[in-house]
Image (cartoon, coloured by chain):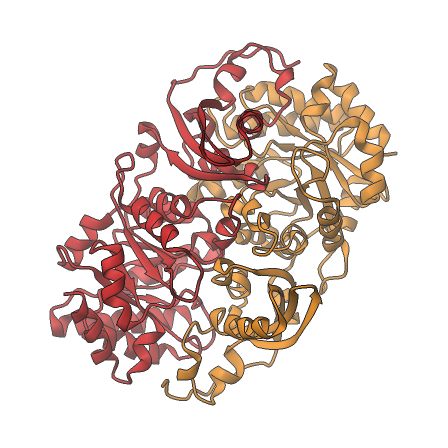
Chain colours: A orange, B red
Amino acid sequence: MIEPTTLTVSGERFLARYDFTGDQSTARERAERLCVEQTIEFPADLVGDDDIRRHVIGRIETLAPIAEGVVRAEISYAVETSAHELTQILNVLFGNSSLLPDVKLVGIELTESLVAHLPGPRFGIPGLRDLLDAPDRPLVATALKPMGLSAGRFGRMAGEFAMGGMDIIKDDHGLSNQPFAPFEDRVRAAAEAVRAANDRTGGRTLYMPTMNGPHEQLDDRLAIALDAGVGGLLVLPGLTGFDHLRHLASRDDVAIPLMGHPAFLGGFVSSPTGGIAHATLFGTLMRVAGADVSVFPTHGGRFAFSPEACTSISEACREPLDQLRPIFPTPAGGMTRDRVTDVVSFYGPDTVLLIGGNLHREDDLVRSARAVRDAVG
Amino acid sequence: MIEPTTLTVSGERFLARYDFTGDQSTARERAERLCVEQTIEFPADLVGDDDIRRHVIGRIETLAPIAEGVVRAEISYAVETSAHELTQILNVLFGNSSLLPDVKLVGIELTESLVAHLPGPRFGIPGLRDLLDAPDRPLVATALKPMGLSAGRFGRMAGEFAMGGMDIIKDDHGLSNQPFAPFEDRVRAAAEAVRAANDRTGGRTLYMPTMNGPHEQLDDRLAIALDAGVGGLLVLPGLTGFDHLRHLASRDDVAIPLMGHPAFLGGFVSSPTGGIAHATLFGTLMRVAGADVSVFPTHGGRFAFSPEACTSISEACREPLDQLRPIFPTPAGGMTRDRVTDVVSFYGPDTVLLIGGNLHREDDLVRSARAVRDAVG
């Protein structure tokens, strides 16, 4: 038995929603175990009637079936368990329980003091619309690809897409620092080409290079990108961690929008009964971590997300969530020019359309980009 | 059509193994698409007969059924696509394809130049055995818990476990910088208590604090830990990224062993047909990234890993893999004192037994630890 402990706690509690597969009585038992697993990870019978039991162990707030064989629990945690750190918030929400079968994290609610530590998206939908002087139309984005081209050719390509009026041009998520087009050469070439195009057209195209790279080089790459005058950053939290995104969103010297990419996050949504709900992962968590734009594979493309999953993601990007700004859902992964109208009608105008390789079906990239830009009004 | 490109490549190629659910002909088609998805992510018909097609697009080396409805493909990638960066290696192996249903990453093979950039485990099984003067017995480890205790109490607890002869005492994975026991206070108290105990007993117990924390504080926490003279580090790559582990394993000033923890990685193993194989994630990737010890939930505990999955992880920790040192599999998650003999007989002597809360079933922690230590010889 652990000696009884007295603690000072604020009473502020954040909340997670979990769906348990099974009937109500086993769900309650599993929810009770989860309250322990996610916090003290210690035999509950060895904790007496003290403040650890009262405050540190998670607390079931509600528990009720939501569908045949699915029981939803709302579990709250003392804000102190999170140390107000995003890494530890994620750890409390789903660290060990990510390893459990048949429990899915389907929602989170922060608290006032957590939001104060997690500023969330710096721009969000309204800020990015201001920056691009695009008050209400869907935005259009594309990527520099394919891997294998030189920095010079990517620079030329970026300039052409900017001349064609694309709002955002990002590095393909697979570009990092390959010898074909080293990071610094590529970023300087693309940033310069986009600036030159903007100067000619009066446009505001943003070039967003990738911040995927070795831990000890992330700061140097950021410095290069900022020095080159890039318009935003592409961040891959599956590879560099959600807290890297939060870090970039919190830095005073990074006053540019961030695009979150789903690479290496798919495992979390690969099981119907475990992992993290699409909306929670690609909507809520991206937003909490500070992405202004969240990329995900749209239904009907190369991936297999359902229309319902895609709708849920776009809703999670935009719905009220503490005081965090709404962000742009960005359906991608097989988007084509002829789908633009359908996609806009499915997702609505507060959407970034990300069209990659398909723009190259026409050799004149300026014209190809312009056609997409014109299609969104 | 992209203008033909000429590239200089080494010819060195790394390899991934994927299991596709389905029949052989659809598997071949999906493997071909995966070769494109993981590299150029660009319409293949727009790439001519050039060096991008020849070298950058992944290449199917073998493809054959391995079981009813499961087809295994070996796909190789030019080492240049990885930029010799772990983040980008993971991106090429499974970045976008983690989002595909019914394909599982089940194995990887590096190349000589990749291994040169990824030193892997600094100690591995032989190095950690030397450090602990334990040439052949299983090792025993425990954790400081439950969250809610003060730094002083964790310090006392660490001293008692060290007096009892535990080989490794780690922070519970849920401890970070909570107000109950702030990081610096806890780390200094535990490191000092373990040092004092080692001085008294002549033992070599290693205390390993967690390196889970905000991106911009990771270096400071490392500096505090090193200054306190800790014996190793606990790393949570699901939260801070696999490359953070690699970074720590590569730093000259971090000449201590690293323990990799599975928190927030479970999503990858939650689907039978998607995600990453248990052995690849908790064995191979932890080892490639530089963990000397890889923690995973053992069968028969609080989690639901099968005995077969656990065996596969321990094999992947120890089997020949390029020139990387073998590492200690560390079954955990509900280990108890009375299971020690069974667990050792299941996993063999090259194992770290991680027993947490169960040690507290006896109030005398020195005696409780000693009983476990004695049980392994």
Along the viewing direction, whichever of B212 and B21 lies nearer the viewer = B21
Q: Is residue A119 above or below residue B49?
A: below
User: Which residue extends farthest front?
Assistant: B68
At 38% from the left and 68% from the top, the residue drawn is: B172
Along the viewing direction, whichever of A202 and A135 lies nearer the viewer = A135
Residue A106 in the figure: left or right of residue B70 = right
Residue B247 seen anywhere in this rendered image of the structure: no
Q: Is residue A65 above or below residue A377?
A: below
Task: Give the quadrant of the N terminus of chain A.
Answer: bottom left
- In the rendered image, residue A291, in percent from the top left (x then y), is placed at 65, 49
- In the rendered image, residue A97, in percent from the top left (x then y), is placed at 50, 63
- In the rendered image, residue B122, in percent from the top left (x then y), is placed at 26, 46
Residue B193 in the figure: left or right of residue B243 = left
Task: Give the quadrant of the C terminus of chain A.
Answer: top right
At 44% from the left and 67% from the top, the residue drawn is: B174
Residue A157 seen anywhere in this rendered image of the structure: yes
Q: Is residue B72 above or below residue A48?
A: above
Along the viewing direction, whichever of B221 and B325 lies nearer the viewer = B325
